[in-house]
Image (cartoon, helix red, strand yellow):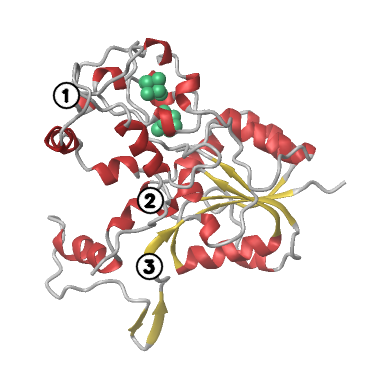
Amino acid sequence: MAKPKVAFYWCASCGGCEEAVVDLAEDILTVTDAVDIVLWPVALDFKKKDVEAMQDNEIAVSFINGAIRTSEQEEMVNLLRKKSGLVVAFGSCAHIGGIPGLANFSNREEIFDYVYTKTPSTMNPAKTTPQTNTVVDGYELEIPEFYNTVKTLDQTIDVDYYLPGCAPPLDLIMNAVMAILKGELPEKGAVLAPDKSLCDTCPRNDSKPEKLMMSEIKRPHTVEMDPEKCFLAEGVICLGPATRSGCGERCINANMPCRGCFGPVKGVSDFGAKSLSAIASIMGIEGEEKMTDEDIQKLVDQIADPAGLFYMYSLPSSLLRRKVMK
Ligand code: SF4
Ligand code: SF4
């Protein structure tokens, strides 16, 4: 019997999700025994034309990582959608925008201006920036268009399932692959990770004082953090209360606070707003019932780059999606 066909594709991302697949190590043999990989540009030499030649829905499942930033990525994911029965958004960038999505605090013009003229290592007196069409020796060269706004995968094509994380952990990848092979998938649109907050599974949760209060906000590198104590109790912002669990508390175990790469639990439409409200609800001053506007401002001023912190992984999937530029 023919094996189900599987594709992996890489859009705007760092390559960590591809590493996660390679990190399956000997488990990848279980996967390759059960499926035929028909596209994986980072590892195998299949071409776009091979995919174009397939029937619609011929690929059982495409795992697509990375956000959508260029016209080439948009074209490839549309092609894969047409040829695939299932599409899984693989990793934070495809799921909620990820770190590349922070570019939505700027626009293309600002990014090009900084990268091609202002970086200290750049010499570009003519201020040349990439153009989609360039004529060289009578030949026209075409490169993909760099879009103004970074999008999540489901803002571009229909997505069946989401595997969260930067990068998704190996157990969740294997569970997803096995569920697909056995046809035991949950309802369409599900995030293939537990629907609980990270605090629910965090080993430091029990160390939270009965009345948790942040009266000062410190940055992780300025405090010697107790490896057993909840970060919030030490005055360090941790986004665990708003983040979906399933990562194995990777950052917490490395004594770093959570930054939300798993995105929110079900039903939350704006991860940053949810995190902000979780943190705002525990801000206070010991012995004082109410905070004055001045107290609040003092605390807020201690948060370096609040938009970048609360939306570190999720700006493109937020309600605002991007900064509105003049
Ligand atoms: S806030 Fe962070 S450190 Fe505290 S219990 Fe939640 S995940 Fe753990
Ligand atoms: S602790 Fe938070 S940021 Fe770190 S891997 Fe887990 S979900 Fe992602």
Counting residues from the start of the chain, the first of labels 3 and 2 encountered is 3
Query: Disc 3 vs disc 2: Cβ atoms closer than 8 Å?
Result: no
Q: Which residue is mark 2?
A: 315
Query: Of circles 3 and 1, which is in front?
Result: 1
Q: Which residue is mark 3?
A: 146
- The Cα–Cα distance between marks 2 and 1, rounded to whole angstroms, is 26 Å
Would residue 319 be found to the left or right of residue 107 on screen?
Answer: right
Would residue 157 be found to the left or right of residue 71 on screen?
Answer: right
Label 1: element kind: helix
- The Cα–Cα distance between marks 3 and 1, rounded to whole angstroms, is 38 Å
- x and y, in percent, of residue 76 in the image: 56, 64
Foreground pick, 43 / 241: 241
Q: Amino acid at mark 3?
A: Phe
Q: Which residue is mark 1?
A: 222
Q: Which residue is rendered at x = 42% and y = 15% of the image?
A: 205
Q: Identify the image quadrant of residue 219.
A: top left
Counting residues from the start of the chain, the first of labels 2 and 1 encountered is 1
Is 227 situated above or below 78? above
Foreground pick, 241 / 309: 241
